[in-house]
Image (cartoon, helix red, strand yellow):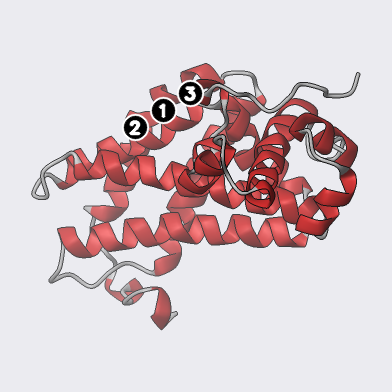
Amino acid sequence: MRYTDAVPTSQKDRSLVGRHPEVQTRLARGSVVSDSQRARLLEAMAQVVSSEGYAATTVSDVVRSAGVSRSTFYELFESKEQCFVEAYRHGIDVLFEEIRSASRSVGDADWEGQLRASNKAFLATLQGEPRFARTYLIEIHTAGAAALQARSETLLRFADGFSHLYKRMRPDQSAPPYEAFVVLAAGFDQAVAERVRSGKADSLVELEPVFTYCAMAILAGPVPASQKTTDRDSN
């Protein structure tokens, strides 16, 4: 059975993609037609892929869900992959904003509290939006070279976050190799992906203590003298 549901009109039913400020605004009535159509296609892509999987999703499914013509789709996007990657990036932006907001709610001096809040926000956001969780963690690997590049950039954004937190926590200490932060970010994603893949997306927040423990082992632990480097740009 092919996916036929229309783009949700209610904000609470939209994916993280539909909650992005640019997409959300353009989904509202009164938007410029071309902007509205692009937003509808992005949200439809997120909805359909979460239901059907990227490989099984067709442009016909997406335009049917968005209520937009096939010709309009190709006026706005070169391919299914381009539309998917743009939708993915919008969802990631919302995810990062949720994490930043949680971190800002904790006092600057409480580094461990900020880390716990950030980890919990990451997990709670994905738990609350299992459709995007599957796209972010699983379907992205099946969507081609551009999608894998976007995935890599996302991991580096997380690694940068850990690196910046380290420098704020320990300004007088040489940082561990940047790859240590990449390993931390990739490990978090893998642990979450395993739960999503096994149908346990409703229990992601339970991973917060484990994530915080692992992060603190790197952020607050000793750095072997032979492994000390500066930051991402020095590697």
Q: Which residue: 48% across, 23% down? A: 128
| Residue 10 position in % (x across, y down) | 55, 21
- View extreme (bottom): residue: 234
Residue 61's disc is none
CB atoms of marks 1 and 3 within 8 Å: yes
Q: Which of 57/173 is in front?
A: 57
Residue drawn 38% across the image and 69% down it: 177
Q: What type is the residue that disc 3 sits on?
A: Gly
Where is residue 26, by image quadrant?
Answer: top right
Q: Residue at x 85, y 33 (%)?
A: 61
The N terminus, quarter of image? top right
Q: Nearer the viewer, residue 38 or 114?
A: 38
Mark 1, secondary structure of its residue: helix
Query: Quadrant of residue 165 in the image?
Result: bottom left
**In the rendered image, which residue does mark 3 sit on?**
128
**Quadrant of residue 53 in the image?**
top right
* Residue that badge 2 annotates: 120
Quadrant of the image for the C terminus? bottom left
Characterize the local packing of mark 1: few (<14), some (14-19) or many (20 or more) Cα atoms within 10 angstroms.
Answer: many
**Which structural element holds mark 2?**
helix
- Classify 144 as above or below 132: below
Q: Amino acid at mark 2?
A: Lys
